[in-house]
Image: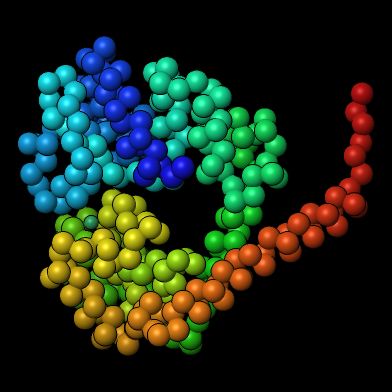
Amino acid sequence: MKIGKLVPKYAPKIFTYCEQHPGESKNLMDAEYSNRIFGVNFPFCMESKAIEHVANNRRFWAKTYTVCGKTVRVTNNWFANSKPKFVQYLIDKNIINETGATDLLQSINTSNPQHVHKAEQKSSYSNKRYRKPAIGDSQNGFVRSILGNLGNESFSDSDWIEVKKSFGQKCVYCEEAKVLVMDHAVPINRTHLGEHRLGNLVPACKECNNEKGGYMDYREFLSSEPKRLNKIEEHMHKHKYTPLKDQENFEQMQEVIKLAHEELNPLSKRYIKILNAMRVEKNIN
Ligand SMILES: [Zn+2]
């Protein structure tokens, strides 16, 4: 289960825990505590009436919960790497046991679960470094590399500097003047098929970039901000970028990318087999 589904599923249990330990509800409304415990950039939850700032408003799910007499909303600012921390928290608070934790973590670990040793799955929440590199990571990298090399457009640092200037040195999503990173308005992955083209590159603050991640394209992310959305489309138009999504044969192209993604899996197994056959296991007694 993805972290974005896991948090809402366990939020009621966390708030039940808070009813018995009121100090914890205060902790969860603290940004520093939430960052340390979960790696998120916002408090785990905030009182509904305190979430007034529009930019912050988008960082909390609309659903409300009642905890210790307060009506709160939970942050939606979760990333995949917060998952082990969140699961660890559920264990620490006795909301789930270690077996439950293993089950929860198994579902994200890899697209190829039969290749991950049980013991490693179990240890993944206590020490991520023990995780084997998953083929899924390479498959996603492979897809990004294909999509990133389509066409023959080239651009340089100075073009990117110009793009940031054209957006007033502000994040295109929240319009705040923060440290800016490159965001692909249409994410480069097998679902969205974004490309690494200047017209698809927009400046974003780290928070918006993380929140939007590979899950949403700019249209979904800015569905309630048509003016900001228009600015991005003007930028795309100016740099002659048309998302593949808008092409008639988009679904066929998605199928092709899916094939590339799948083809890497047997290829990696073949080489693992070859190298395993060449390996000599030494018995050290
Ligand atoms: Zn932003």
| 195 left or right, relative to 236 | right
Q: Determine the residue positioned at 34% across, 61% down.
A: 216
* Quarter location, residue 172: bottom left
Pinpoint residue 8: horizontal percent, then vertical percent: 32, 37
Give the vertical position of 76 relative to 268 (above or below): above
Q: Determine the residue positioned at 19% across, 23% down.
A: 67
- From the viewer's side, name the closer residue of 176 and 123: 123
Pinpoint residue 229: horizontal percent, then vertical percent: 20, 70
| 58 left or right, relative to 258 | left
Pinpoint residue 267: horizontal percent, then vertical percent: 74, 64
Give the vertical position of 14 relative to 186 (above or below): above
| 222 left or right, relative to 147 | left
Give the vertical position of 244 relative to 186 (above or below): below
Pinpoint residue 256: horizontal percent, then vertical percent: 56, 76
Q: Looking at the figure, which quarter contains the C terminus?
A: top right
Give the vertical position of 185 relative to 248 (above or below): above
- From the viewer's side, name the closer residue of 33 and 95: 95
* Quarter location, residue 274: bottom right
Q: Is residue 218 visible?
A: yes
Rendered-image quarter of ligand 1: bottom left
